[in-house]
């Protein structure tokens, strides 16, 4: 059911009992002149009915909600075919007419707030619309109708935003998923979607979510972050930026690892920006988030199963298909399962310069997780064979972390040097050194080179990609 239909249905249900209260034949005049009747009990006219009962409203907050509800109902009934811009322009007149029709409601003090909320309900995503428009907020978490959190500057804070009830949250949810051809109801209580600006949305509703419909929105900047932005944020240094740019230009296979919310996708987007404009790039994601500026980009997105549990297209299916699309570069949004095997095989069979991300706590942990994910492909491969695949495919692992003070840093840039015996040899090229925490809770530390040049340094020189040796030496 659409948002319009839900609100119309809700409105009809609220007005329906009128005749039961005053009788089908009673009129406004007859009710008004009965002895003992006060102003609060006089019946009033409503846009879609002849009569309705007035309620006594003592609480100012109740008056505010009542006025908002009546105004929204009137717009959805009387102006539903009008242009939204015209409705917003006429909002003052509409509210004035509603107040005139309903003498029991006093004019609320903050009409600007009321108009803003009504506009958000009609043109945006309800109460969370201001949070979506706030560029300083990077994530929004709705835990039921009365608890909305937001991440600002890396810190999660409770906002004063609330929804009316569970139905209000569901109406906003439907407005998000309906244009994408997705559905969310009791038979399909979880959904991954995205907004028009590319922001990623995850939602889960009762009976799975006990506290009410739960929405998590990962916002993305209208203008993608550049490497200069990451340097300014302290995510990496100029030397590290120069190094990873050279790695991308040299068509090395790079894996970005890190925890949830550590900034992996942002870093992957920056890495992708270094790819030549002449390359054919195929991106593969669960929900399209990458914002590449190159001309020749083919974006692929997974598809969930339909209501019958059929028709799903997984990351692995798309990775296999991408190999037939003549890609110069394959960029995988996140590797989490059996697609790891297909990705490693692609990297080992001529698809150099591939990029991917995955969840892990360290470069060594990422290697271990890749071994596990390859086994999830259902192939009964010996561990040594898997490690040979990993050691032969990957060149660099970039570890990203979200520190306790909310900052996001690249904590390791690590070279995969090869296989010695049954052990994959890793060597840090750049690391983050923490010195302590200041009184404000901010972590003190810096990103430094280890002084070791990678094994592929000479190969990069042969290909005409020059890196000054000084970037591998720590500055005093």
Image: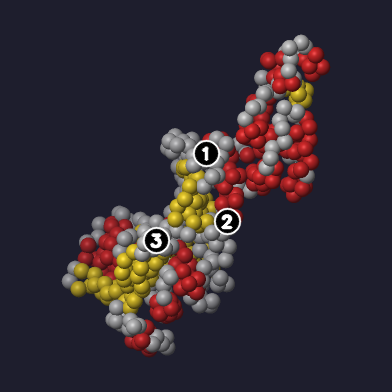
Q: CA distance from mark 3 to mark 2?
A: 25 Å
- Among numbered discs 1 and 2, the one appearing first in the sequence: 2
Quadrant location of residue 447? bottom left
Q: Quadrant of the C terminus?
A: bottom left
Mark 2 lies on residue: 134
Mark 3 lies on residue: 440
Quadrant location of residue 431? bottom left
Tags 3 and 2 touching, CB below 8 Å: no
**Percent x, y for residue 43?**
75, 20
Crowd around label 3: few <14 · some 14–19 · many ≥20 (10 Å):
few
Crowd around label 1: few <14 · some 14–19 · many ≥20 (10 Å):
many
**Percent x, y for residue 120?**
64, 46
Residue toward you, 296 or 232: 232
- Residue, x 69% and y 40% (percent of image)? 109
Q: Is residue 233 above or below residue 17?
A: below
Q: CA distance from mark 1 to mark 3?
A: 33 Å
- Identify the mark at residue 207; answer none if there is no mark: none
Circle 1 sits in a helix, a strand or a loop, which is it?
Answer: loop
Mark 1 lies on residue: 145
Residue toward you, 10 or 53: 53
Residue toward you, 201 or 306: 201
The answer to whether 449 appears left or right of 321 in the picture is left
């Amino acid at each position: 059911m659409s948002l319009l239909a839900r609100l119309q249905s809700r409105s009809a249900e609220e007005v329906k009992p009128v005749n039961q209260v005053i009788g089908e034949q009673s009129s406004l005049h007859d009710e008004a002149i009965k002895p003992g009747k006060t102003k609060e009990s006089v019946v009033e006219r409503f846009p879609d009915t002849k009569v309705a009962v007035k309620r006594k409203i003592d609480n100012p907050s109740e008056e505010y909600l009542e006025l908002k509800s009546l105004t929204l109902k009137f717009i959805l009934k009387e102006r539903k075919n009008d242009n939204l811009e015209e409705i917003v322009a006429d909002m003052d007149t509409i509210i004035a007419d509603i107040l005139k029709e309903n003498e029991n409601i006093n004019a609320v003090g903050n009409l600007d707030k009321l108009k803003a909320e009504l506009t958000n309900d009609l043109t945006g995503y309800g109460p969370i619309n201001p949070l979506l428009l706030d560029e300083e907020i990077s994530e929004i978490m709705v835990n039921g109708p009365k608890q909305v959190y937001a991440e600002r500057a890396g810190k999660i804070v409770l906002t004063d935003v609330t929804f009316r009830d569970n139905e209000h949250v569901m109406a906003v949810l439907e407005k998000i998923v309906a244009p994408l051809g997705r559905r969310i109801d009791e038979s399909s209580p979880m959904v991954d979607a995205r907004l028009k600006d590319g922001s990623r949305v995850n939602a889960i509703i009762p009976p799975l979510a006990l506290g009410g419909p739960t929405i998590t929105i990962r916002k993305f900047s209208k203008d993608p972050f550049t490497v200069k932005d990451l340097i300014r944020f302290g995510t990496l240094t100029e030397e590290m930026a120069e190094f990873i740019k050279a790695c991308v230009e040299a068509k090395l296979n790079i894996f970005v690892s890190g925890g949830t919310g550590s900034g992996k996708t942002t870093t992957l987007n920056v890495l992708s920006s270094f790819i030549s404009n002449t390359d054919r790039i195929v991106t593969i994601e669960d929900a399209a988030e990458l914002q590449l500026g190159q001309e020749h980009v083919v974006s692929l997105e997974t598809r969930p199963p339909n209501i019958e549990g059929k028709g799903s297209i997984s990351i692995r299916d798309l990775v296999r298909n991408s190999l037939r699309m003549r890609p110069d570069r394959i960029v995988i949004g996140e590797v989490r399962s059996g697609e790891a095997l297909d990705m490693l095989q692609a990297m080992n069979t001529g698809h150099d310069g591939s990029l991917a991300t995955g969840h892990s706590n360290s470069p060594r942990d990422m290697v271990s997780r890749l071994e596990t994910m390859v086994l999830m492909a259902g192939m009964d491969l010996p561990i040594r064979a898997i490690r040979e695949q990993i050691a032969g495919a990957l060149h660099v692992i970039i570890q990203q972390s979200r520190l306790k003070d909310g900052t996001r840093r690249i904590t390791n840039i690590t070279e995969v040097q090869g296989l010695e015996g049954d052990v994959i040899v890793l060597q840090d090229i750049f690391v983050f050194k923490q010195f302590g925490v200041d009184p404000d809770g901010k972590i003190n530390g810096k990103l430094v080179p280890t002084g070791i040049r990678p094994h592929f340094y000479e190969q990069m020189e042969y290909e005409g990609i020059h890196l000054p040796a000084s970037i591998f030496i720590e500055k005093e």
